[in-house]
Image: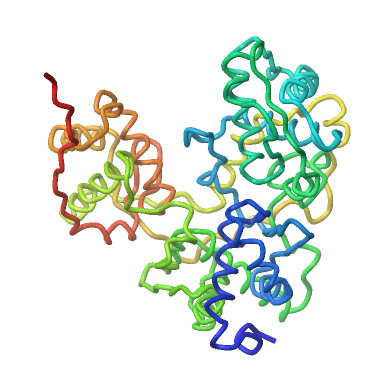
Amino acid sequence: MSVAEQVSPLELADYQRAVRLLLAHPLITEVHPNRAALPLVRRWAAQLRTDLHELLGYRLVTTANTARLLRAQDDLDLTRPAMTRTDRPFDRRRYAYLVLTLAALGRSGTQIALSELAEAVAADATRIDGLGLDTERKPDRDAFVDAVTWLTERGALALADGSAADWASSPDRAEALYDIDREVVFAIYRPSRVLQHLGSVTGLLETDRGLVQGVHRIREAAARKARRLVLERPVVYYADVSESLRGQLRHPGLAEDLERLIGQAVERRAEGLALIDTSGRLSDIRFPSGGTPSQAALLLSTRIAAQVAKGTLPTMPAPTAAERTEASAARIDAGLPLRGVVAELTVAEPGTEPEPEPEPAESALYPFLTDAWLKGAMKDLMSTYGSAFAVAWRGDPDRLLREALRLLSALGLVARVEGGVLALPLLARYRATTAEIKPRPTKETS
């Protein structure tokens, strides 16, 4: 039975809030994202388990202290990295320390000292070429503490005494003691396949090859994938998907299913569709929002939209989803230890390699703006609005441009290509944006 038949109108808003919580936070514990989240999800666990599987192909696993949503990944998304204590994306070193820390915690008891945990991780890290963990080096300690803090925020570790920040600053003088929640540790790391058996990260992507048989099941799988695309992407352009998926996206039942499931509207346009998050609690990226990069991205988007409106720009097709996945996979696979025991275990498992997406039936051309034009536009924005930007950004317009373009690309407003960007249709939403300068307050000097 569908959600419409099982959940009463009086309780529907509460149920939808639980759905949005799980989609925004695939791991929910007693402390993450807040203490009210787990009781809410547990209340609706049975209905959530059914609906999320039938509509999206997701699997919900609950224990006494955790709720873990296991998503079906259709493509590689590099826009949602783990973040450090200072809101910087994890680099390869931090991801490696995170996984090695999880492995060490899985072998530990109920408590562990931070220095002891660092020693265990260092012992494993030294066996990996180019990694290592030297507790005498401050950058290594900082990266390790970022991984530990990420786990602490999610409840895998609970600080019992001391300070990780103090240990990172002076390991000879400071220490930290943690309680280990093994249930959370095991809930965090749930790969869909045995990693040692994969030769590429694309082996983790969803594929129905060899599993889906019959026209009806193929249609159901396509419908689930279409719903996932709308949920997982900020915008889905018809020109970016195959003809079969395009038909599913245009079916009125898709919007009805998603709106009933999560309580948010699906907006349809000629070029595609997008889920409009009026709650502000489902999106992982708020735009527009505070902060200099977001403000610069908004201002840059209006400049790009104005330039596009002149109708004088050259056009070209955007990279397809398959091409983007291939490029992302190449970057990730470059760090795989494909030698020694891992290389010997790597096998081609039936059904683990994604089938190539059929070419879109219709091509779309988008206005192209060069890197030179973008740099000039950012220089002009700095001269006009620079007084409203944070001091740290004023002296580095190139870095600010990179961050602004990264944000616009993550939101589906532009597509990065060699030599510049392509302006995508959603960008037109911001063409009439106006800005007012509010200078930052300055301290009075005597």
Q: How many marks?
A: 0
Residue 111 x %, y %: 80, 34
Image position of 362 (left or right of 61): left
Image position of 245 (left or right of 436): right
Name the one closer to the observer, 10 or 227. Answer: 10
Image position of 60 (left or right of 194): left
Q: Residue at x 54, y 86 (%)?
A: 10
Image quarter of the N terminus: bottom right
Q: Residue at x 83, y 31 (%)?
A: 343
Q: Is residue 28 above or below residue 291?
A: below
Q: Residue at x 47, y 36 (%)?
A: 87
Name the one closer to the observer, 370 or 259. Answer: 259
Residue 185 x %, y %: 76, 44
Image position of 90 (left or right of 86): right
Q: Residue at x 56, y 79 (%)?
A: 257
Residue 129 x %, y %: 73, 18
Image quarter of the C terminus: top left
Q: Is residue 299 above or below residue 396?
A: below
